């Protein structure tokens, strides 16, 4: 499926992320067949349109089953041609659907129901402040669609599938790349086609004060002669301090395995054989492993389906592997060199306090 990335000028502020969303245009409608302009008019799907939606649903299902993509929620235009497309897809991929009024097609005013490929209509679409006699101008449309994309961008943990219309696809495309007026007016995608849009290259502001974290850990360990107590507070300290985490904790080396130790987050797998998963790889290689995108790490063990990136750092005691610190994030590429360096220092401080019971 085509994949578009945000250009530098579309990357606003520092809250943005490497998240993405998918866009699908509705299936074929009665007015598509009759070659009529269909904006706010509610022209239903044809049988072929329903089948196109199911084909797209099956393509997405296949990718989900192979772990290639993940979708949390479908947002759809309330107009029946999009809503019915979304419902067909939802039944196949088993993801909930919610109507999002901002995805409603542009109202083309006096052009509604006229010939789709008319030269005059193509020209009219290049007028951005004209509401086509009772319709909605391009400027107004841009306002609601850009606001919606900005909102989606603030939820990097969630991956949405948007189901809507060609007028909406054109506006979304313009959020991600420059286009001439002519190119913008002529832009469209096929019925039931899927496009992926990525907010890449931009990471949420996840800076952390690792000096402070190390000092806090040191004081939490003072006078404590219990590894369980120390590891519990270390996991809690990381989890409550570092932004955008969904799991932080320890696996303790035990023979050829790693056993779940103190942690914060969802319940996790109890045993990890050495060499298996990210934790097992870090233990076996005895070095830090940073995974930018867990879907691209062969053998990753998924404990929490929200996880997108991960860092695992070996912990030592008396020159031997004691276990690993495992930290997961719902944001792609969350762990940068500063985090690696900071967390490795955090582990060095921790190692000073461990006694092995
Ligand atoms: N993802 C880890 C397993 C542990 S959970 O993330 C808590 C791995 O692949 O080793």
Image (tube, rainbow, N blue to C red):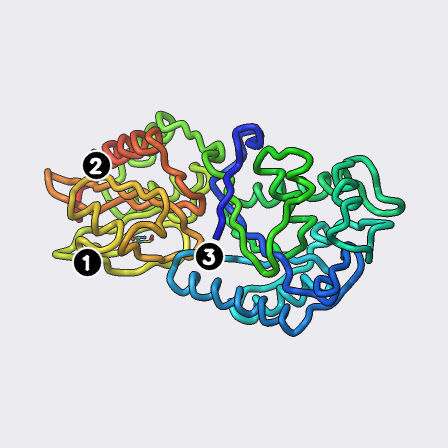
Q: Does residue 246 show up?
A: yes
Dot placed on the residue nearer the N-terminal end, 3 or 1: 3
Q: Which residue is mark 3?
A: 70
Q: Position of residue 35 (x, y in %)?
A: 74, 60
Checking the image for residue 273, the label placed there is 1
Quarter of the rendering containing residue 45: bottom right
Residue 99 horizontal side relative to residue 322, left or right = right
Dot placed on the residue nearer the N-terminal end, 1 or 2: 1
Distance CA(mark 1)–CA(mark 2): 23 Å
Above or below 209: residue 291: below
Dot 3: few (<14), some (14–19), or many (≥20) neighbours within 10 Å? Answer: many
Q: Residue at x 43, y 37 (%)?
A: 242
Residue 202 horizontal side relative to residue 287, left or right = right
Quarter of the rendering containing residue 311: top left
Q: Closer to the observer: label 3 or label 2?
A: 3
Q: Are marks 3 and 1 in contact (CB under 8 Å)?
A: no
Q: Residue at x 31, y 60 (%)?
A: 269
Q: Closer to the observer: label 1 or label 2?
A: 1
Q: Which residue is mark 2?
A: 351
């Amino acid at each position: 499926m085509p994949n578009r990335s945000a250009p530098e000028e579309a990357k606003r502020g520092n809250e943005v992320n490497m998240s993405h969303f998918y866009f699908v245009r509705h299936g074929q409608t009665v007015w598509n067949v009759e070659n009529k302009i269909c904006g706010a008019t509610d022209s239903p799907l044809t049988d072929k349109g329903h089948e196109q939606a199911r084909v797209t649903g099956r393509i997405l299902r296949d990718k989900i089953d192979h772990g290639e993509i993940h979708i949390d929620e479908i947002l759809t235009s309330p107009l029946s041609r999009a809503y019915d497309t979304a419902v067909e897809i939802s039944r196949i991929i088993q993801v909930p659907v919610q109507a999002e009024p901002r995805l409603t097609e542009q109202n083309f005013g006096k052009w509604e129901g006229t010939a789709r490929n008319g030269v005059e209509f193509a020209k009219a679409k290049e007028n951005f402040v004209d509401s086509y006699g009772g319709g909605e101008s391009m400027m107004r449309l841009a306002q609601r669609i850009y606001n919606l994309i900005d909102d989606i961008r603030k939820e990097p943990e969630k991956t949405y599938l948007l189901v809507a219309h060609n007028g909406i696809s054109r506006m979304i495309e313009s959020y991600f790349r420059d286009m001439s007026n002519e190119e913008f007016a002529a832009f469209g995608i096929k019925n039931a086609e899927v496009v992926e849009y990525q907010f890449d290259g931009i990471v949420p502001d996840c800076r952390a004060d690792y000096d402070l974290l190390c000092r806090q850990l040191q004081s939490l360990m003072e006078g404590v002669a219990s590894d369980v107590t120390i590891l519990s507070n270390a996991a809690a300290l990381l989890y409550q301090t570092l932004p955008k985490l969904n799991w932080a904790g320890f696996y303790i080396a035990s023979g050829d395995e790693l056993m779940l130790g103190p942690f914060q987050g969802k319940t996790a797998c109890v045993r990890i054989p050495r060499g298996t998963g990210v934790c097992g790889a870090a233990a076996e290689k005895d070095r830090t492993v940073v995974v930018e995108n867990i879907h691209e790490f062969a053998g990753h063990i998924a404990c929490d389906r929200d996880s997108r990136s991960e860092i695992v750092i070996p912990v030592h005691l008396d020159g031997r592997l004691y276990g690993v610190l495992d930290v997961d994030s719902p944001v792609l590429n969350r762990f940068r060199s500063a985090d690696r360096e900071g967390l490795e220092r955090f582990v060095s401080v921790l190692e000073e306090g461990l006694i092995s019971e």
